[in-house]
Amino acid sequence: MHIKHKKPSELAKLAAEFIGTYMLVFTVCLNNTTKALDNPLAHALGIFAPTAIACVLMVLIYSLGAVSGAHLNPAVTVACYFQEAIEFMEGIKYIIIQCAAGVLAGLTTVLLDGSTDTSNATEQHPVGPLNASFSIGAPLVEFLYTFMLCFVVLNVCVSDATKGNKFYGVAIGFVVMAGGYGGGYVSGGYFNPAIVLGVNFMGLSWWGALYVPIYAACHLAGALVAPVALHIVRPETKLPEKHINAVTKFFYKVEAMFDSEDTAEFIGAMFLALSLSLNAIANSYDLSHGGAGNPGGSLSVGAALMCMIFAMGDISGGLYNPAVTIAYLGRFHHTGCGVGKEKLQDFATSPKEGIKYFLAQTLGALAGTGLCILIWLASGDFPIAPIGPQPVGTHVSVNGTDTVVMHTLGQAFFAETFGTFLYCFVVLCVATTFTPLKEFKAFAIGCTFIAGGYAFGPLSGGVLNPAVAIADCLVRVEAITKPLTPLSYVGGELLGGILAAVVFRFVTHSHEMDMEGEPEGYERLAVPGPAGYDKLEGGKPMTG
């Protein structure tokens, strides 16, 4: 018997948006009240606030996505409207319901846990939206990570290329984790106008009338830019000519000037460098002002990596790292295979693609580091934490003064080498084998970075990415004044990528190098390859 499924009613959709937005904003507000308490337990719980918010957003999307799409954010609704994923009037109703749910969640928090003295927020947290030093940086952070959130939503939920996936909730929810640590330290990490309204209603004050519309404008700006970036990396998502006006036609011409794979690598590397730099400087800033530092750095960068691979892994392979590019080139050398036609592939047959990936990744890292400088520029503190050996701890010298003991450059070199080896080796194992990991590929790769960051980070900072190391040292002019440090870091990271390819090819996966049939996910190239590889073009592009 065939059962016909009915579509959710309008009431069901609006109820889903209200319940989902209410629970999301309520979670944010409760975490804010906890962080404001002056006790050790509150500080410990506050560390996990971005993780808690990311998790509740993830489960709400999985729970309500089939009913309303689980936007739970006016900015997401705007981005979906401009991609024609929702009708205008339905979108207006969504936004009204979302904002009402946010306000009610803030008022509920006041009834449950009392009003928060938001006028004293800068004293509770040295960095935040009230600090005049971040009048530029805080809105910029909100814009960038709202753009990232909407961009991920469009890629994993709206694009036909990824329809049917089961990772969409993780991909969207973990954007909050990516931006909530380093970025949240500057702006509060809202990325949602409904959350801004809810937090403001927890403690009405004179400044709320100023920063709420500014933040909301930044969120909407991020939502407007996201479809433009989507059209560049996925040209097939552009709307038909009959649906567009003269302004849209102009943007389409501009979008056509960019290469989709290179742009995907640029955007991914940019957010990795931005997240790593924001977390590093937040950690050093907090320590220098008597705080406990920022322990969520590696978690944040790993989450950013996951989200970018989930969003664009099927476009360029989702590498975002020159060391991974080296590992891929070594793995595919003389195989006649690669990520796809006009993408990264066998260096012997297409040397230009490898160079283009290197350039896109390095330029993306420079852009991310430059944005971090702009965010912190008005604070008066030097904007970028240095690349180099990390402190062991303090030591009391003979004359009674405390000195900071540092790890050596040699220790940092080995940490970066083996940390990058672990990262690249896992990427090759889960993404380039005969039967690659599918739904959990990005999750596995992101978690590997988290593991490497916390394991090797105390020695070297856990950069594990030559593009980020190059960008950081260039902006600090250390590439000229202290060339041994960047050379050691970049050299160690590239060496880690080479070792990963060697171990993969000749030790653990030598059986994969001469296979009969077609490896799942590879694109066959019209070039000579090893025995067993079909030399005709076709096949499904690998989504590494």
Image (tube, rainbow, N blue to C red):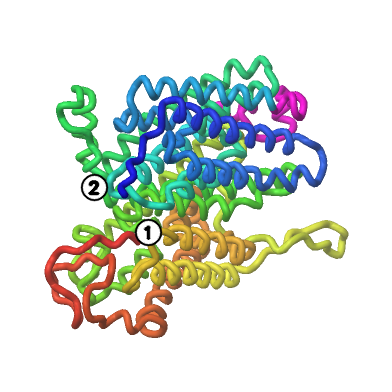
Q: Which mark is residue 259?
A: 2
Upstream in sequence: badge 1 or badge 2 = 2
Does 255 sit left or right of 182 as displayed? left
Q: Hey, what amino acid is under mark 1?
A: Leu
Can residue 219 be seen?
A: no
Q: Residue at x 39, y 27 (%)?
A: 78
In this view, the residue in front, 98 or 266, is: 98
In this view, the residue in front, 456 or 397, is: 456
State the residue position of label 1. Answer: 319
At numbered mark 1, what does the secondary structure look like: helix, strand or loop?
Answer: loop
Q: Is residue 438 magenta?
A: no
Q: Residue at x 48, y 45 (%)?
A: 62
Q: Which residues are magenta?
A: 109-135
Q: Residue at x 32, y 29 (%)?
A: 82
Specify few, some or many for label 1: CA neighbours under 10 Å numbering under 14, 14-19, or 20 or more: many
- The quadrant of the image that shows the C terminus is bottom left
Does 158 sit left or right of 179 as displayed? left
Does 245 sit left or right of 223 as displayed? left
